[in-house]
Image: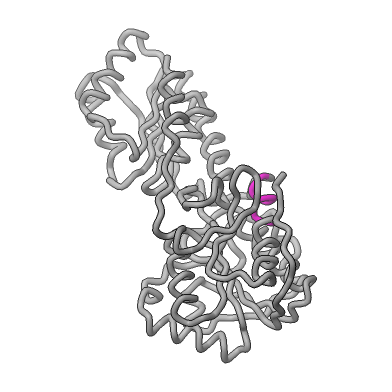
Amino acid sequence: MFTLPHLKPIKTYKSIALLTSGGDSPGMNPAIRGIVRTALNSGIENVYGVRHGYSGLIGGDIHKLTSRSVTNIVQRGGTMLKSARCLEFKVPQVRAKAAAILKEKGIEALIVIGGDGSMTGAHLFTEETGLPVIGLPGTIDNDIPGSDDTIGFDTAVNTALGAIDRIRDTALSHESLFLVEVMGRNSGFIATQVGIACGAELVVVPEYEFDLHDLCVTLAKQRANRLGSSGIIVIAEGKDPGLTSRIAYQLEELGQEPKICILGHIQRGGSPSGHDRMLASCLGASAVQYLLAGYNDIMVGVQQGAIIDIPLRKVITDNKTLDQNIFAITTLLHK
């Protein structure tokens, strides 16, 4: 359960809009539902959905949403509003054009669900145009500063765990070593939680440097001493593409025969977990409440179970670091 803020409405809005931007994540639909229904039940007459993120915003792909529009979406993965990455939105003139489109339609505020790039766009948009904006952290990577959790992270971890549990059946049957690559972009949050929860023999993340050759030599020796027992190595995709393949190649040079499994975008799809549905619904409802309470240029996140607000400027300038003590557990649990 989450502790919700106690906010007093001081502003009124006739029309607001919302969009999902960047990579999709399980839980975006419950967030959309939370925003739409809270807004309509709080006296906001019109709620508009922008299709295809910022690209749809500058293209005028804006449609009115009703309570019925968001019926039966809470269990669906992805985003009913579709999403896209929009490099054009980095240009101030393009953001001014987007504001003009919203104002022309009578839309007085915008709620943005997305990752760090989306939050950057949201901050610049409100700073330059004066249109109130509230952000929600929607990404499986869990790399948004200011919030302990992001919409979609829990589902992605559980999806990866389900896949690895199945891989381990084959690893045990053939006494094989599997290198399993998980998503997370430049962060190791998914890899660390998945590695601990699946009982991986080793976890590799971009936050902590390692010597590739030394790692492979140590791993090969451990495997030799255990006379071919099975193993799972969880590797975060990281900043440097091809790391999993390079680890596999060096292990082959040392006489091992590792198998590679790259989980990829399977982690971004699927029905959101109960945790993500709850998180997204609470964040979506709270975003509307913060808007009506006069807040602007903030992201609504969660810290220690409490729904809180974080200035967007702080969100886009800070870094979220992987807890060293949590990562240390991956080493303590080695065989």
Left or right placement of residue 181 versus residue 46 in this view: left
**Which quadrant would the N terminus be assigned to in this image?**
top right
The residue positioned 46% from the left and 40% from the top of the image is 189
Left or right placement of residue 256 versus residue 327 in this view: left
Q: Position of residue 105 (x, y in %)?
A: 61, 89
Q: Position of residue 200 (x, y in %)?
A: 45, 25
Q: Position of residue 61 (x, y in %)?
A: 55, 81
**Which quadrant would the C terminus be assigned to in this image?**
top left
**Count of labels in the image:** 0
The residue positioned 64% from the left and 64% from the top of the image is 287
Q: Nearer the viewer, residue 176 or 143?
A: 143
State which region is magenta: 275-281
Q: Position of residue 94 (x, y in %)?
A: 40, 82
Quadrant in the rendering for residue 182: top left
The residue positioned 49% from the left and 25% from the top of the image is 168
Its colouring scheme is one colour
State whether residue 251 is above or below residue 82.
above
Reply yes or no: does residue 283 show up in magenta: no
Q: Nearer the viewer, residue 199 or 168?
A: 199
The residue positioned 39% from the left and 49% from the top of the image is 185
Quadrant in the rendering for residue 65: bottom right
Q: Nearer the viewer, residue 98 or 232?
A: 98
Q: What secondary structure predominates along the stretch shown in magenta?
A: helix
Left or right placement of residue 167 versus residue 106 in this view: left
Outermost residue toward the bottom in this view: 104
